[in-house]
Amino acid sequence: MKDLDLHGFNIHDAWKEFTKHITECYFSDIKHTTIITGHGKISEEILAWVHANQYCKTIKRSKNTGAFIVDIKKNKNNKKASTIEKPKVDLSPLLKKFNSY
């Protein structure tokens, strides 16, 4: 699990950091993340952010009331670098052309 602490951020910057963090979690196949908001305005906004974010599944308040646990959707399109097939290119005609000069 990966955490994000939003203490000290204004609302707009906190939202940007939240969006960036959730996107990183999604593409890194992280299933859960803890978002530490404290008890201020960010804690009032976080619920709307989660429901509006395409990569978030659910949100619940942590045992620590100034934090939330967000469940991340599974990235079904994420292929590991080793499984991606690279097209094979035959460069021999090009080499013949350049070697003839």
Image: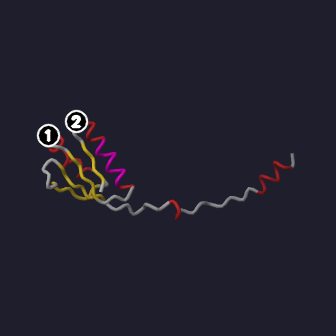
Question: Percent position (x, y) of residue 15?
Answer: 26, 41
Q: Of the numbered discs in the image, which one, if any, rests on residue 40?
A: 1
Q: Quadrant of residue 18?
A: top left
Q: Residues within 10 Å of mark 1 (few under 14, many from 20)?
A: few
Q: Secondary structure at mark 1?
A: loop
**Is the magenta region chiefly helix, strand or loop?**
helix
Label 1 to label 2: alpha-carbon separation? 10 Å
Q: Quadrant of residue 10?
A: top left
Residue stretch in magenta: 17-25
Give the foreground label among 1 and 2: 2
Q: Is residue 77 left or right of residue 40?
A: right
Question: Percent position (x, y) of residue 14?
Answer: 26, 40
Q: Quadrant of the N terminus?
A: bottom left
Q: Of the numbered discs in the image, which one, if any, rests on residue 8?
A: 2
Q: Earlier in the sequence, mark 1 or mark 2?
A: 2
Residue 21 is one of the magenta-drawn residues: yes
Q: Is residue 46 left or right of residue 91?
A: left
Question: Percent position (x, y) of residue 100?
Answer: 87, 49
Say which of 91 and 33 sits in front: 33
Q: Residues within 10 Å of mark 2 (few under 14, many from 20)?
A: few
Could you tell me which residue is drawn at 30 percent across and 42 percent down?
17
For residue 64, above or below residue 12: below
Residue type, numbered disc 2: Gly
